[in-house]
Amino acid sequence: TTTTTTTTTTTATQFITNKRCPYAQKAWLALETSAVPYAMREVSLYGSGGKPDWFWELNPAGTVPIVVTVTSSSSSVTAEVDDDGKEGRVEVFADSELILDAIGNGRIVASDTMDTIDTNE
């Protein structure tokens, strides 16, 4: 008997930054060269607009850049569900060095990868 399980993993990556920050620029270059698809969201560093509340929730230190990845998997056999009842995992990398390390270690990757596992019984 052969059982085939196909799991599709999708990762959405959001890059939260201010284009004038040199630390953010370093992470931005790393994202660009890694070919990881991402959406950029720019925040004001100073002034009346300031940083919004959602930004402070992601990084209480108030620094840019931040990368947020949301990874979801769908499987024909099982799916992981978190405490909120949603499938997937959210990771926040709130520092340029953490972002560079995560890209280098494969924790921030291109989306829509597919793994197929064949089990012969």
Image (tube, rainbow, N blue to C red):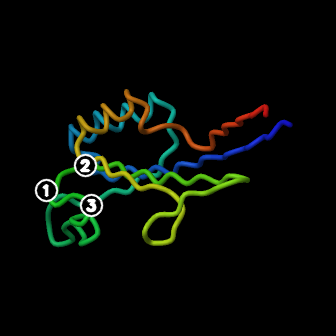
Mark 2 sits on what residue? 94
Sort mark 1 into few (<14), some (14-19) or many (20+) by Cα contacts within 10 Å.
few
120 relative position to 22: left or right: right
Residue 114 screen position, x and y as percent: 67, 39
45 relative position to 83: left or right: left
**Front-most of residues 57 and 37:** 57
Looking at marks 2 and 1 on the same chain, the residue that comes earlier in the sequence is marked by: 1
Cβ atoms under marks 2 and 1 closer than 8 Å: yes
Question: Residue at image x 31%, y 32%?
Answer: 100
> Residue 58 — which label?
3
Cβ atoms under marks 3 and 1 closer than 8 Å: no
Three-letter residue code for mark 1: Ala
Cβ atoms under marks 3 and 2 closer than 8 Å: yes
CA separation in Å, label 2 and label 1 = 9 Å
> Residue 16 — which label?
none
In this view, 48 is above or below 109: below
Mark 1 sits on what residue? 61
82 relative position to 95: left or right: right
In this view, 102 is above or below 19: above
Three-letter residue code for mark 2: Ala
Question: Residue at image x 33%, y 53%?
Answer: 16
Q: Secondary structure at mark 3?
A: helix
14 relative position to 112: left or right: left
